[in-house]
Image (tube, rainbow, N blue to C red):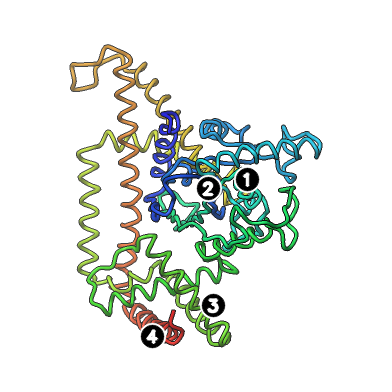
Amino acid sequence: MGSGMRSLRWFLRLLARLFFRSVEIVGTENVPREGGGLLVAWHPNGLADGILLLGFSPRPVTFGARHGLFRLPIVGWLLRGAGAVPLYRRRDRGEPGARMSDEERRAANQRSLGALAVAARHSFVAIFPEGATHDEPRLLELRAGAARLFELAQEDGGDPALVPVGLHYERKHAFRSRALIAFYPPVDLPADLRPERGGARCPDPDRPATEGTFVDRLTGLIQQHLIEVTHPTESWELHRAMERVRSLVRAEQALREGVARLGRAPMQERDAGFARVWAGYRKQRAIDPRVVERLVARVSRYGEALQLLGLNDRDLDRLPVRRTAMRLILLCAEALIMLLLLPTLVLVGNLVNLPAALLVAFGARKFSKTRKEQAGLKMFLGLVILPTAWIVASLAVGLAWTEPLPGFDWRPEALWVRVGGMMALCGLSALLGLRYHRFIQELGRGLRALWMGGFRRGTVERLRRQRSALYDEVIGMVAVLDV
């Protein structure tokens, strides 16, 4: 890996870790250390999906990207720096720079696929077989491009691996939420899809594969494995119900096992729990759909009650008034200490970083056509707006600081020292702002818990009983189904 690629990967990891509170990476041992292949993933979160794969893959990856993205500021620079290959899809021919005939576009696309196939024989190519990003909880219909690329990579003795990747987000559009990247073992190809296989070919990657061709069979196999690693549901309502079942089972089980304080589940645990719940739901629905529909309705009503109260399943077991009040006192003491000891950092954070952060959020909403694009836009807008705000503020302070501050007899003579000091102050205040972002969330939860524990105790007890009854029903169903 060259120094340029290492620098780019380091930069993308930094960008992702600034936006997400945590990025969990599991299964890196499943990506072969030698040879080449394809990383195939679904595409639920726009540019953020590409940033995570490019930044955290255990091996460098090459991307095939819609040609229009190369024209965007910063995004185009990053794509070219990563060695991405432009793809000229039929659906994009109305974009600027795509004024070419079908024959020209097809020829350009074949050249791009050929370049990606060469890369896939020796390293890894990341591809989203759906062909477009989306906000659905289910997979879009897969296009034939990924299978066609794999077929091309098998030519001339190539033996690429096909590695499914699960991308999961806690709240994919939200700043400081969490993300999970799960690399799964390479697909064990059936004999007729291995390099020595025969079978008809589908020469045009834009045309849907006809039944029985190599591309058709491989596309079906990719879809099967992506379903296994992403657990897509039919609707967001059903997805939220399954997530609620996972959460209430975990909380009730911890209570019955005597766990004193249950923390937030790691993303890998959330994913595994959701997969078990979803598998049980599908099995029971096939046996008796009426039973499972009634259970889902009860779970939804329970979840709506929690949401109205601003609580989650874990909050029901940690509402003692005395302990909650003590936690709030400690949080307020922490805030007071910061204000007393670090007033300059707090002031700089409010004057410089807060307006810039609000501008990032406004810009992401204004310029994103759909919600799925907001996470990536927030990353890139923050990359531009925050440093610009720091530079402007630092230059303004450096040029305006002509006299010693009140109470001090010393002033840095060199302009670069004053500007550099202000830049460092902006950076530190941004880090402090991240801590305050979390502090406000904890304070809000504490106040709600204090209210519920002190004045709505009967409501909490009723919800606890509902959770216990739902848990017993779910566990009984799981035992019968052997999930």
Residue ID for mark 1: 155
Q: CA distance from mark 2 to mark 4?
A: 45 Å
> Is there CB contact under 8 Å for labels 2 and 3?
no
Residue ID for mark 2: 37
Q: Residue at left 64%, top 37%?
A: 86
Q: Quadrant of the C terminus?
A: bottom left
Q: Residue at left 31%, top 67%?
A: 449
Say which of marks 2 and 3 sits in front. Answer: 2
Q: Position of residue 391 (x, y in %)?
A: 41, 25
Q: CA distance from mark 1 to mark 3?
A: 40 Å
Residue ID for mark 3: 282
Residue flagged by tag 2: what amino acid is it?
A: Gly
Residue flagged by tag 1: what amino acid is it?
A: Glu
Q: Quadrant of the N terminus?
A: top left
Residue flagged by tag 4: what amino acid is it?
A: Asp
Q: Nearer the viewer, residue 349 or 285?
A: 285
Q: Earlier in the sequence, mark 1 or mark 2?
A: 2
Q: Residues within 10 Å of mark 2 (few under 14, many from 20)?
A: many
> Is there CB contact under 8 Å for labels 4 and 1?
no
Q: Earlier in the sequence, mark 1 or mark 3?
A: 1
Q: Secondary structure at mark 4?
A: helix
> Is there CB contact under 8 Å for labels 3 and 4?
no
Q: CA distance from mark 2 to mark 3?
A: 33 Å
Residue ID for mark 4: 472
